Amino acid sequence: MNMFIMCSVKLGLCTCILNNLLLCIILQSSHTSEGVWPLPQTFSTSMVRYELKPQSFHFGYRGQSAAQRDCSVLDAAFERYFALIFSNNTAGNDKFSVDEPFTLEINVDHHDCESYPKEDSSERYNLSVSTGRAFLNAETVWGALRGLETFSQLVYQDNVGSYFVNKTDIEDFPQFRHRGILLDTSRHYLPVQAILKTLDAMAYSKFNVFHWHIVDDPSFPYQSQTFPDLSGKGAFHPVTHIYRQSDVRRVISYARMRGVRVLPEFDSPGHTQSWGKGQPGLLTPCYRRGVPSGTFGPVNPALPSTYQFMASLFKEVASVFPDSYVHLGGDEVDLSCWKSNPSILTFMKKMGFGVDFPKLETFYMEKIVNITSALNKTSVVWQEVFDNNERHTSQSVVEVWKQGCYLCEVRRVTKAGLRVILASPWYLDLPGPTHNWARYYTVWPLAFKGTEEQKKLVIGGEVCLWGEFVDATNLAPRLWPRASAAAERLWSDEKQTSSVKQAFPRLQDFRCRLLRRGIQAEPLDVGHCRHEYQGV
Amino acid sequence: MNMFIMCSVKLGLCTCILNNLLLCIILQSSHTSEGVWPLPQTFSTSMVRYELKPQSFHFGYRGQSAAQRDCSVLDAAFERYFALIFSNNTAGNDKFSVDEPFTLEINVDHHDCESYPKEDSSERYNLSVSTGRAFLNAETVWGALRGLETFSQLVYQDNVGSYFVNKTDIEDFPQFRHRGILLDTSRHYLPVQAILKTLDAMAYSKFNVFHWHIVDDPSFPYQSQTFPDLSGKGAFHPVTHIYRQSDVRRVISYARMRGVRVLPEFDSPGHTQSWGKGQPGLLTPCYRRGVPSGTFGPVNPALPSTYQFMASLFKEVASVFPDSYVHLGGDEVDLSCWKSNPSILTFMKKMGFGVDFPKLETFYMEKIVNITSALNKTSVVWQEVFDNNERHTSQSVVEVWKQGCYLCEVRRVTKAGLRVILASPWYLDLPGPTHNWARYYTVWPLAFKGTEEQKKLVIGGEVCLWGEFVDATNLAPRLWPRASAAAERLWSDEKQTSSVKQAFPRLQDFRCRLLRRGIQAEPLDVGHCRHEYQGV
């Protein structure tokens, strides 16, 4: 009766009140050490545990909930999480025992079952587990999804295979609302299955944005309805190495079901070599000693046809991708080709740019930003677009990616009143163990001098997995569990998660959980998981 | 008729004789660029091609062959290679056409079908592909396996899915007879399936030794018949994380079928923490300020019981593992614990070793070498065992693993008349792309000053994949295709394979072939394969 122990997780210690006695125990019992990753904001647990049996466990909607049966997002989530919770069911059903039922009842305030997660969607939830039932309250179905993930991580098996969950109370919400993973499907083609599997794993770590760097110099796998030649001539292969409209819809739908937004990037004016194959006249012809060299540079910003093409393309993109954000790129523009081209030089003169080529870059990006603004999209751009434009007139979100003092850049961008997504510290290109998880965990996105208003403009961060040396063969072990370290940084309270040492055993347990769920997450160090990946 | 073009691959160029005209073409046609990896010693090919159809393709034994039907190794190989050659069969059978049959006929000199590959087994083969048939001649079935692998790599598909093989003549043999891969199943447990899959991939690159570093400090997964407590108490888990006798037999049998020897390593006296759990009294108790500290050091070399135990253990190992080599380890012995222990110091005094602890190490290793010699096994030891012993009385094979001037060590060991296995330049622990394939390709094991006799003592090399950060989740992409770079160095003629630039497209093609065969080999650089790994 009086065994309920209130604990508030703080720096790995647990202040415990038991019958008015103040006790301190360390959260290292067999189940709680597995815990929840990323760590919830407030977390009260108890030694009282309840057995869960697959045959008497149910998900349900509370009477007052805005979402009820046939809520597509939650109905599907119930099925997924039932399978995840009761995976490795070795105990077998005891058909003759009368089991106490256990129900997880959901209440959500808004009926957003058929919509898409948005940049300002609440992901807050409360979860209360007690005798025979658990209550999960959330403002939105997206918050309910986060709570279901948490609940699934609270369930553990004892040595004979029975399932248990402890008495628990959780209030939880994300520290940052934009928690993304960038995949690059241009340098290597990623089969749709590999993307879907990544979306599964993202949901396990509570990521909520899939930044799809879908095209770049090496290949153009997006099959455009308006410009089919872009993939027809610009993909690695026009049939096997493309994303059809149906593939894109499948990815968006799969992501939606997991509360993940799909943020497409069509990077220009640089990084567009593959575009040129299917869209002659789009790229700038480079010159050598006064004659065309046969090579091409960035998109040609001097031609009206460029903007007509971009308007058509982004009109399609805006309709295919439901998210209100679209990423316009704008990084690493090589100016040498523009400088070599006589008609570009003429255009510069006419526009009064002198020899200030970054002005030309800004001119181009502003046109593209305006195109997407007219389509009611918020544009996201890489940091150069901000750096080049002193006026900062556009209301783009700026993604900070360069190495070095990235917080200096965050400070500058937020000082200009613009929103920031931080990527610099989370480039996962170089593999572990030289670049291990702790490197990605000990990142403090708000550790710059700035006002409260400035801090609020840091809307989140993204883990970037560029594709030079990554395809479906090594994607999963390169991402996981290192990306999960970033996930905790972006979701959890910084003060409660500042210690690498305390995070380590929790992340090891979480990594084993990923394995059990079929995610090929690589090991952090010497050791083992109860269920090893079979490698087949 | 006169279209037969003789080409001899040399430095990537092909000298071609056509109707008495000398032509030079670069081997970059659609099929030959895929070529054979590792590169055969002599390779004549032609533009004349023959279509192969699954329904009319057969393997057969020539009349004079010592091996005939029911040769277990070759019968099984025929099945495997038929499936590999005609994988991705999309063309469908044309049941109404009468196909010209094509037969690959094998002749081997020795009936070694039921034996194990040995350290001096010939792997030489000749392969001649002409109208309607191919002849494969080898001294042993192991050579025939290498020839079958080569033949399978000669077959290619055109754009409509038909299979072809070109007129070809190959004489081939390995540069080094010991071409190994070390897997570490102590730092992480590798499920048997992951080992078998690695053996498959090893055969594709013509590796012939699986160095099984089966036990070490973190865990003792080998289930000994004589000492079941070693795994019972020393494995990560006594049931799920062990290799049963049946598992070991399965690995050895699977390896044999692919011409791969299994070289077991039971490393001592260091690297034995896990042994101590199931064999009390085996390890040296460490002392601090004159009293036992509760921790243990290397195997206790002062006790007769140690050698009784080792004699029993190695007697079992010698009977379980058929190979004539056994690896005894002997690396990285931490002397501090021995130095702290009073009875060790007494023993040192009694033996007249003074304070020369490496002498104690040598004393121990000589005892173990003698135990295995009495069991008719050739011992392999890590280089410290050689370094510590000035007399070099034992006839062990020395494995050179330390970084730095490893060829200096190779020179010293061969000067002492001992055989060398080179591992130093092929440590694959650190992942690519910082440690990329070219690093492992540009290794010249014989580039030291020494006599012809000394060079002959370099019997080969081993790729080492230590397990600190590797388990079944990332084993395959970390090994392949980087290990294949070492495989070519160990098999092929150094002069013909000295150029990274020329090897690159061939290795890219080979990597795509590995993918097609289900090996999760990671990409070398930006690009694509016709058949991508699906990532599921």
Image (cartoon, coloured by chain):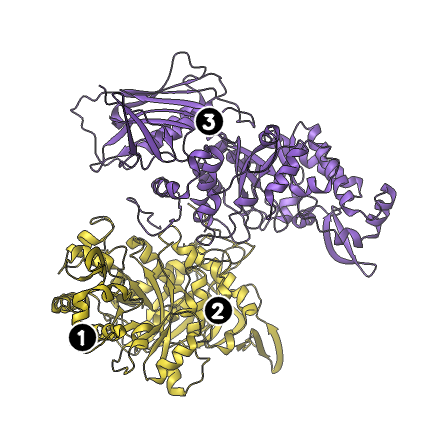
Chain colours: A purple, B yellow
Quadrant showing the C terminus of chain B: top left
Give the chain of mark 2. Answer: B
Q: Nearer the viewer, residue A101 or B141?
A: A101
Give the answer, above or below, for where B421 lies relative to A347: below
* Residue at x 47%, y 60% (from the top left corner): B511
Q: Which residue is mark 1?
A: B349
Q: Specify the subunit that label 1 lies on.
A: B
Horizontal side, residue B511 vs residue A315: left or right: left
Extreme-top residue of the structure: A64
Which image quarter: residue A3? top left
Observer able to see residue B408: yes
Contact check, label 3 and label 1, Cβ < 8 Å: no
Q: Earlier in the sequence, mark 1 or mark 2?
A: 1
**Residue neighbourhood size for the residue with mark 1, other residues' Cα within 10 Å, grouped as few (<14), some (14–19), many (≥20):** few
Disc 3 residue type (three-letter): Phe
Q: Are marks 2 and 3 in contact (CB under 8 Å)?
A: no
Secondary structure at numbered mark 1: helix
User: Residue A125's mark?
Assistant: none
Residue B112 visible? The answer is no
Q: Which residue is mark 2?
A: B441
Residue at mark 3: chain:
A
Per the model, the C-alpha gap separating discs 3 and 1 is 68 Å
**Mark 3 Cα-neighbour bin, 10 Å: few <14, some 14–19, many ≥20:** many
To which residue does mark 3 refer? A173
Three-letter code for the amino acid on which mark 1 is drawn: Lys
Spatial separation of the CA atoms under disc 2 and disc 3? 51 Å
Q: Is residue A201 left or right of residue B352?
A: right
* Residue A391 lies in quadrant: top right
- Give the image location of residue B289, x and y in percent: 23, 59
